[in-house]
């Protein structure tokens, strides 16, 4: 970030917003925004409690299971759509529909089909993440230089060899980009699932703290959630930069 021609450190914007948050909290403009220093004090007081550890373990389990399912299903489906025009024409309209549709409306259906437990939360998390992963994987395959595929066939590569050694690696930058966005969407999905399907994990803490007007506790849990999502997103962005040379070779 540049101000008056001077390059500021990368975390300057966060520090600026943190100072603004602290000022607004100290002025007492609204009870909903306590001072940031108070939020961090609350965070350090609850972060090791059994209730918080149980909540983060339940949220992490649903999140990891949902994201893993989205990747395991979404990447192969996206690659196959990029390879097969028939499959692409059959599935692409549905993928676009689910990507743009308000998936929260599916929560009552999932509750009827799969109950009020962790299974429904994992499924809604998967649904939030999978569609963008499919589209990005498809886009990556469609941009592959066809000479790579023809060369693999000339050397006797089987369809599975072409899938695992050509399509996947050549489309890897787009695949990682889709996974990064899917992870961000999965964070929303797991919290929505925990709030609407079964009041567990971070969803239970949000419900408890907001109902009792414990805004310091509420914001402390929200900061932890944002920090986890940001860390995972930045790690995947780092992997994208590391494999970017595949795109230039492609």
Image (cartoon, rainbow, N blue to C red):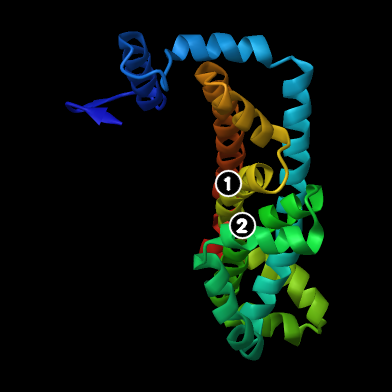
Residue drawn at x 59%, y 77% is: 94
The residue sitting at the front extreme is 211
Vertical order, 5 against 139 (above or below): above
> Which quadrant holds the N terminus?
top left
Quadrant of the image occupied by residue 129: bottom right
Inspect this view and state whether residue 103 appears: yes
Most foreground residue, 189 or 68? 189
Residue located beneath label 1 in the image: 188
Q: Nearer the viewer, residue 198 or 248?
A: 198
- Please state the horizontal and vertical placement of residue 64, each as a whole percent of the image: 75, 45
Tell which circle, 1 or 2, labels the residue nearer the N-terminal end.
2
Is 234 above or below relative to 212?
A: below
Question: Element under label 2?
Answer: helix
Tell me which residue sits at (64%, 79%) in the image.
81
Against 58, is 127 above or below? below
Q: Tell which of 241 and 55 is nearer to you.
A: 55
Quarter holding residue 107: bottom right
Which residue is under mark 2?
Answer: 128
246 left or right, relative to 79: left
* Element type where label 1 sits in the image: helix
Q: Residue at coordinates 71% horizontally, 52% vertically from top-left?
A: 67
**1 and 2 marks in contact (CB < 8 Å):** yes
How many numbered marks, from 0 up? 2
What's the CA distance linking mark 1 and mark 2?
8 Å
């Amino acid at each position: 970030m540049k101000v008056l021609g001077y390059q500021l450190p990368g975390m300057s914007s966060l520090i600026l917003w943190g100072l603004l948050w602290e000022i607004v909290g100290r002025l007492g403009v609204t009870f909903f925004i306590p001072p940031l220093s108070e939020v961090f004090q609350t965070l350090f007081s609850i972060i090791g409690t059994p209730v918080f550890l149980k909540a983060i373990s339940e949220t992490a389990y649903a999140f990891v299971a949902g994201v893993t399912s989205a990747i395991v299903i979404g990447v192969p489906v996206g690659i196959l759509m990029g390879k097969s025009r028939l499959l692409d024409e059959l599935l692409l309209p549905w993928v676009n529909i689910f990507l743009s549709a308000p998936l929260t409306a599916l929560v009552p259906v999932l509750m009827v089909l799969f109950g009020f437990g962790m299974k429904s939360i994992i499924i809604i998390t998967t649904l939030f993440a999978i569609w963008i992963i499919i589209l990005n994987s498809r886009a990556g395959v469609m941009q592959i230089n066809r000479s790579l595929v023809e060369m693999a066939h000339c050397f006797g590569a089987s369809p599975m060899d072409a899938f695992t050694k050509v399509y996947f690696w050549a489309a890897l930058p787009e695949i990682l980009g889709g996974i990064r966005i899917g992870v961000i969407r999965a964070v929303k999905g797991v919290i929505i699932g925990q709030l609407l399907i079964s009041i567990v994990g971070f969803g239970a803490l949000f419900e408890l703290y907001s109902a009792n007007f414990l805004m310091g506790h509420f914001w402390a849990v929200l900061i932890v959630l944002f920090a986890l999502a940001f860390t995972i997103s930045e790690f995947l962005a780092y992997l994208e930069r590391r494999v970017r040379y595949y795109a230039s070779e492609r």
